[in-house]
Image (spheres, rainbow, N blue to C red):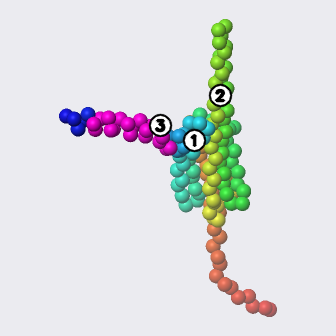
Amino acid sequence: MKNEKTNKSETFTPSLFTDIFDNAKFFGKNWIEKEFGQSLPAVNIKEGNKEFNMDFVAPGFKKDDFKISVDNNVLTISAEKEEEKKEENKRFTRKEFSYHSFSRSFTLPENVNAEKIDAKYEAGILNLSVPKLVETKSLPKKEIKVA
């Protein structure tokens, strides 16, 4: 029985220190997301015969919140949303602010037509259609006789 009591107190102390000094809680990914409202949306990329389809899970945004650009063959998708809620009463005023943003970049393969990228946002999903360039068939070598 004496050992059980000792084990309980030993487990309590490390647990307390672990909770206080756990760097992952303060400096890990979740901490950054909570403190700065920034998280990366999940993305699914599917390659078809004529295009790539990219689906981003980004609920809570409006289509005007997104910025999509291609620069030097790098596709960048970002969004930014800022909200302010204010509640006033005779006895108090309460203001709440929230800020959510993300930015993701992808290097495009050489076989895409960046001029024809199409984007749609519906039901919290941003869908990008990135068409591939149409490959031209090379013709066999032909000799031309001079007349």
Residue 32's label in the rendered image is 1
- Look at mark 3 in the image and give the residue it sits on: 20
Report the amino acid beneath label 2. Answer: Phe
In the rendered structure, the answer to whether residue 98 lies left or right of residue 45 reads right
Q: Quadrant of the C terminus?
A: bottom right
Question: Badge 3: how crowded within 10 Å, few (<14), some, or many (20+)?
Answer: few
Report the amino acid beneath label 3. Answer: Ile
**Of residues 146 and 94, the one drawn nearer to the viewer in this rendering:** 94
Disc 1 and disc 3: Cα gap in Å? 17 Å
**Contact? badges 3 and 2 (CB < 8 Å):** no
Residue 5's label in the rendered image is none
Disc 3 and disc 2: Cα gap in Å? 28 Å
Q: Secondary structure at mark 1?
A: helix
Verify whether residue 94 appears in magenta. Answer: no
- Look at mark 2 in the image and give the residue it sits on: 97
Vertical arrangement, residue 142 with respect to residue 129, above or below: below
Residue at the image position 62 percent from the left and 63 percent from the top: 109
**Residue 83 placement: quadrant:** top right
